[in-house]
Amino acid sequence: MEQIRLKSNQLITASPSQFHRSIFSRIDINERLIGIMGARGMGKTTLLLQLAKSKFGVDPRALYINLDDIYFASKTLHQFATEFRNKGGNHLFIDEIHKYPQWSVELKIIYDTLPDLKVIFAGSSTIEMVKHYANLSKRATIYNLPGLSFREYLAMQSIADLPVIGLQSVLENHLQIGKELDVDTNILMHFDRYLTRGYYPFSTENFELYKREMEQVIYQTIESDLAYMEGYDPHNAYKIRQLLSIIARNVPFKPNLVKISELIGVHRNTLIGYFFHLEKAKLIQLLYPTGSIISILQKPQKVLLNNPNIAQLLCEPLPSRDSLMKTYIVNQIGSQYPIKLGINETIDVDGKWLLAIETSRKLSQKKYSLPNTYILADGTELGNEKRIPLWMAGLGY
């Protein structure tokens, strides 16, 4: 355990302190069992280390472990947790939980037999959490960690420290919010930069390195992370890459399942499963029509890439402004609300609001006249009575 302790101390000490994700302040590490789920590259490891550092530093009562470490090939997680607790430990921070066999069973045993030990674990968004609720229901508090919001990007880059403002407040009070925020006149320049290189919390300022890191995230997600999904065959990674390439060339689009099935050589139901896998891995977004009940075998009405950064990396030719803004809105708001595709191509948010995206001041009159419809306008810093600045949708977390 001494080598594990040494690694833990080094990593905790080296973790950054100047910027924290918005979720950081919401996590109460004194709860007995906490899970942090997120896709590759979202910053789960950094968040775990920052939580440990802020509360404990290198205090021996807290320990960070990574279950990808070969040390855990010969010792059960419960055995290790018991040994740690017996040496005075009370907070165990566990990374890469999905790489440990029967992880949910082990966590349940720890929870039931070590009541004075607090466990905070992080794992891939590809984990089928529903299938583990039999072991973790009523025990674990689960948080989902998306990529950076536009607000978080501004804070991470030391550009602006804006408050978290929920969607309802933005829709109802955007004029007052614009006045109170004292928005930088370069906010639209920063917004365009965010669309290209702001969603992933990578530390590099070099855009070429940023793109390379994104490429690695995509590759490792398909080759490694998807393997932890039930029903996924790793031998089909090439076909998954084929599908992602087809998606990148056509987004946003309504998929022709018969045609795509023929192109990549899989059955229709298998293809729908591939779409589902890519969405779980946070590489794409699937939109279904308002009023529909979503199931794994249901055909999506619209397919988008997950975020504007991926869209501008993979799409050839580059995505249209309208496509990019729709991707941004669905990404930012979809991490907080259920989203479906409304009538006339509007975005239906939780059945409460319809969002129409305007990129050229030529929005269809049909969209203006729909009840409970709000116009999110691109290219405006402050908006007016009828138009809400589209960038403000990125203030929600």
Image (cartoon, rainbow, N blue to C red):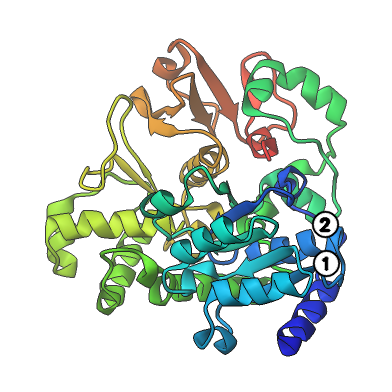
Identity of the residue drawn at 71% across and 85% down: 1
**In the image: residue 237, left or right of residue 150:** left
How many numbered discs, if any?
2
Q: Quadrant of residue 163?
A: top right
Q: Is residue 127 visible?
A: yes
Q: Secondary structure at mark 1?
A: loop
Structural distance between the alpha carbons of marks 1 and 2: 7 Å
User: Which kind of residue does numbered mark 1 sit on?
Assistant: Pro
Residue 3, x across and y down, in percent: 73, 89
Identity of the residue drawn at 70% across and 37% down: 395
- Rendered position, 252 above or below 312: above
Q: Secondary structure at mark 2?
A: loop
For the residues labelled 1 and 2, say whether their Cβ atoms are less than 8 Å apart: yes
User: Which kind of residue does numbered mark 2 sit on?
Assistant: Phe
Q: Is residue 197 visible?
A: no
Residue 161, x across and y down, in percent: 85, 43
Q: Residues within 10 Å of mark 2 (few under 14, many from 20)?
A: few
Identity of the residue drawn at 51% across and 42% down: 138
**In the image: residue 328, left or right of residue 291:** right
Q: Quadrant of the C terminus?
A: top right
Identity of the residue drawn at 33% across and 71% down: 241
Say which mark, if any, is on residue 19: 2
Residue 49, x across and y down, in percent: 75, 66
Q: Residues within 10 Å of mark 1 (few under 14, many from 20)?
A: some
Q: Quadrant of residue 329?
A: top right
- Rendered position, 284 above or below 211: above
Residue 100, x across and y down, in percent: 48, 74
Residue designated by label 1: 16
Report the front residue among 46 and 272.
46
Report the front residue among 388 and 352.
352
